């Protein structure tokens, strides 16, 4: 059996619903330790939500390090009876491999693990250092996973130069898109105070919904920035509005509005917060906002890593890849704090988080080869 496919199947068979790892990282360590990797488990989080992280590193002759990053945790299955086959039993049908985590992102993890094995078999004394950063807290709160490892590495003075996150980035065919950055995410919970009262005596109350609506309309219509060559314009979206006592004859005393910015590198979290405050003050509201910064935007411009991955994709598949920063956040936002070049690349993402998640079996070997070719290109660059 193909070794990459076999490893994918072994990973799928482990019921690693976030934050559980279910032995996936131990399996990877058994693959990596014989290759000279020093494998370290970094655990974090409370006892009822314990997260395991694997940091595996193999020094090379040169100073620079390539990191493959990924997550072994998966989202819950949803209604199991709707699956065509059990979600944690790898199943082959019509040229596809089914199972929870098949696309997001156990295929990528298996592919770059085998790519490292093949690369070191052919190049036992590489110029570059190699590392894998694997977490079981990407699909969850993401507070005890990659961010914890990155902080530990920063404190140790570990140097990372290039990172490939195995997120499923391809859209219609393998290799058609890589992510060379992601937008930032800033969430606000706005509370606007009013005066509760009887709906028949509005002169004795102050309706916070009525007061807040013009400000919300202005926020929704505001152009926050125009984006740039890599990022679309920053967006503002309201996700929830809560008010009222449940009674139809009571003016509420407060309205709570949840909203989110997905912002480009043309804006900052601090600047967006200030502009929101200016709008709310201008409308004379009695307000507070609780802010949560989900992640800063990051961008890797075309250069060594982007060129190496693009070239590897073209050589393996003949596909001219597109650069993109669309989509949600990823652990790249944490890694970019300690690594100047971070990109994401993996299989087709059409089935991620869905019932009957799957990958095309014919894509697995080429994905592994693209990772291996990238290793070869960066090693040659280091030797030059």
Image (cartoon, rainbow, N blue to C red):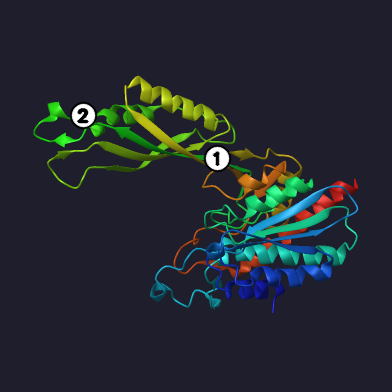
- Mark 2 burial class by Cα count in 10 Å: few <14, some 14-19, many 20+: some
Instruction: Give residue 58's position: percent from left, percent from top.
Output: 82, 59
Q: Earlier in the sequence, mark 1 or mark 2?
A: 1
**In the orientation shown, which residue stands out farthest toward the top?**
282
Q: Crowding at label 1, few (<14), some or many (≥20) Cα neighbours within 10 Å? A: many
Seen in the image, is 214 located left or right of residue 331? Answer: left
Residue occupying the point 82% across, 71% down: 34
Q: Name the mark on residue 206.
A: 2
Q: x and y percent of residue 239 in the render?
A: 37, 43
* Camera-side mark, 1 or 2: 2
Q: Is residue 128 visible?
A: yes
**Quarter of the image where the C terminus is located:** top right
Considering the numbered disc 1 on the image, is that residue within a helix, a strand or a loop?
A: loop
Point out the image quarter for the N terminus.
Answer: bottom right
Question: In the figure, is residue 219 to the left or right of 8?
Answer: left
In percent of the image, x 72 and y 41: which residue is there? 340
Instruction: Report how many numbered discs are placed on residues in the image.
Output: 2
Up the image or down, 225 lies above or below 384; here it is above
Q: Nearer the viewer, residue 164 or 74?
A: 74
Q: Nearer the viewer, residue 367 or 264?
A: 264
Q: Which residue is mark 1?
A: 183
Q: Residue at x 46, y 68 (%)?
A: 77
Q: What residue sits 24% from the left and 36% below the top?
A: 253
């Amino acid at each position: 059996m193909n070794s990459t496919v076999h490893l994918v199947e072994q990973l799928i068979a482990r019921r690693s619903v976030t934050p559980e790892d279910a032995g996936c990282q131990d399996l990877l360590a058994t693959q990596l330790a014989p290759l000279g990797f020093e494998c370290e488990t970094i655990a974090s989080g409370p006892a009822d939500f314990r997260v395991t992280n694997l940091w595996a590193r193999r020094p090379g002759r040169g100073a620079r390090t390539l990191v493959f990053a990924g997550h072994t945790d998966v989202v819950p299955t949803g209604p199991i009876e709707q699956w065509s086959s059990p979600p944690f039993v790898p199943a082959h049908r019509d040229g596809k491999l089914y199972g929870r985590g098949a696309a997001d992102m156990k295929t990528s993890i298996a592919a770059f693990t085998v790519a490292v094995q093949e690369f070191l078999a052919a190049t036992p004394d590489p110029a570059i250092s190699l590392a894998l950063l694997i977490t079981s807290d990407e699909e969850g709160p993401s507070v005890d996973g990659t961010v914890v490892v990155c902080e530990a590495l920063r404190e140790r003075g570990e140097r990372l130069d290039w990172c490939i996150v195995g997120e499923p980035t391809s859209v219609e065919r393998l290799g058609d898109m890589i992510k060379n950055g992601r937008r930032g995410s800033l969430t606000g919970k706005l509370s606007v105070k009013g005066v509760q009262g009887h709906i028949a005596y509005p002169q004795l109350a102050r309706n916070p919904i009525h007061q807040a609506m013009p400000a919300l309309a202005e926020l929704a219509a505001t152009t926050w920035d125009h984006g740039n060559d890599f990022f679309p314009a920053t967006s503002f979206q309201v996700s929830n509005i809560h008010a009222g006592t449940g009674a139809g004859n009571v003016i509420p005393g407060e309205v709570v509005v949840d909203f989110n910015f997905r912002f480009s590198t043309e804006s900052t979290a601090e600047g967006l917060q200030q502009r929101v405050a200016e709008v709310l003050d201008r409308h004379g509201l009695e307000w507070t906002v609780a802010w949560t910064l989900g992640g800063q935007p990051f961008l890797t411009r075309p250069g060594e890593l982007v060129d190496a991955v693009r070239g590897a994709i073209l050589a393996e598949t003949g596909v001219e890849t597109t650069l993109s920063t669309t989509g949600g956040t990823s652990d790249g936002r944490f890694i970019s704090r300690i690594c100047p070049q971070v990109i994401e690349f993996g299989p087709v993402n059409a089935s991620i988080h869905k019932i009957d998640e799957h990958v095309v079996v014919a894509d697995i070997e080429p994905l592994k080869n693209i990772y291996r070719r990238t290793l070869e290109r960066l090693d040659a660059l280091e030797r030059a």
